[in-house]
Amino acid sequence: MHAIEVKDVIKRYADHLALDKVSLTVARQSIYGLLGPNGAGKTTLIRILNQITAPDSGEVLLNGKRLQREHIARIGYLPEERGLYKKMKVGEQAVYLAQLKGISKNDAEKRLKAWFDKFEIGAWWNKKIEELSKGMQQKIQFITTVIHEPDILVFDEPFSGFDPINANLLKESMLELRDRGATILLSTHNMSSVEELCDSITLINKGRTIVQGAVQDIKRQHDTHRHEIIIETEHPEALNTLTERYNMASERLGENGPFHLTLVSVAPNEALHEVLNIGRLVSYRDILPSMNDIFISEVQSQNHIS
């Protein structure tokens, strides 16, 4: 049974078709990327999952059951547009929001103290929200999103505004939440985070699904057959001949360092064998396209066709 199933969902706003028969399945205890350019329909789908709006047709299932009002209590939602009461104290507001999610004041304070210590913001408990930086406020919102330990977490652009250190802290927290049983739906434009965190993704554009599947499978499907070879050799003149024959890009790493070669071939063994005859192999790897490259290529391709 999947944690989330979206089946042929259609949503229209006046003359704008926001979602056009979008389907996806999210495995339990996984991190699933919902990707797409601005205006693709991601936020519309997230709003449907959170019952802020409803689909015109199609259905959404959570843990095998059709989406119902009571499911809201088992979802934690961090929207892209944040909002906290600026004049309230941090701890007071966090406890209040936790109580809205059914946690007793005593339990809320215990859980929040643990999270505040983890995020190194304990000293801000009695400060007003307006005294916090944007990044600090985002930490508070993340904590209040997960504090009731929901089965499903939906994060919309959670890394926006975070420096690399705090973004990494957030990633580690997401992985811990997944390992403790949560299913995470992550919408982000940060493709490096997708590669680090996501098991599978759906890429939508103009309301339609254009790429879907496991991240590593998608990268292999878009393989451009590029290979990286790093070799040490005392015969650069022989290497020059090989690079011309196989149309390899060549660059020396430092004045007396090894050579970095890039080979484009569906059958690299012959070229690699000849390279090994003139030097010592330092490393070899296939260069799979990044999710950022795939994102740009697929969206531009669909836009061109449209």
Image (cartoon, rainbow, N blue to C red):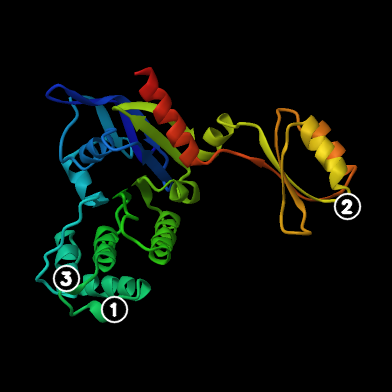
Looking at the image, residue 80 sits to the left or right of residue 284; the answer is: left
In the picture, the disc for residue 129 is 3
Residue 69: x percent and y percent? 16, 42
Residue 182: x percent and y percent? 37, 52
Q: CA distance from mark 3 to mark 1?
A: 13 Å
Q: Nearer the viewer, residue 266 or 35?
A: 266
Q: Decide if residue 184 is in sight here.
A: yes
Location of residue 95 (image quadrant):
bottom left
Closer to the observer: label 3 or label 1? 3
| Mark 1 lies on residue | 122
Which quadrant is home to the N terminus?
top left
Check if mark 3's residue and mark 1's residue have beta carbons within 8 Å. no
Q: Nearer the viewer, residue 254 or 155?
A: 254
What is the secondary structure assignment of the residue under circle 1?
Answer: helix
Closer to the observer: label 1 or label 2? 2
Q: Looking at numbered disc 1 in the image, what kind of residue is underneath it?
A: Gly
Badge 2, how many Cα within 10 Å: few under 14, some, many 20+? Answer: few
| Mark 2 lies on residue | 234
Mark toward the start of the polypeptide (1 vs 2) = 1
Which quadrant is home to the C terminus?
top left
Q: Looking at numbered disc 3 in the image, what kind of residue is underneath it?
A: Ile
Q: Looking at numbered disc 2 in the image, what kind of residue is underneath it?
A: Glu
Residue 123: x percent and y percent? 27, 81
Q: CA distance from mark 3 to mark 2?
A: 64 Å
What is the secondary structure assignment of the residue under circle 3?
Answer: helix
Q: Decide if residue 1 is in sight here.
A: no
Badge 1, how many Cα within 10 Å: few under 14, some, many 20+? Answer: some
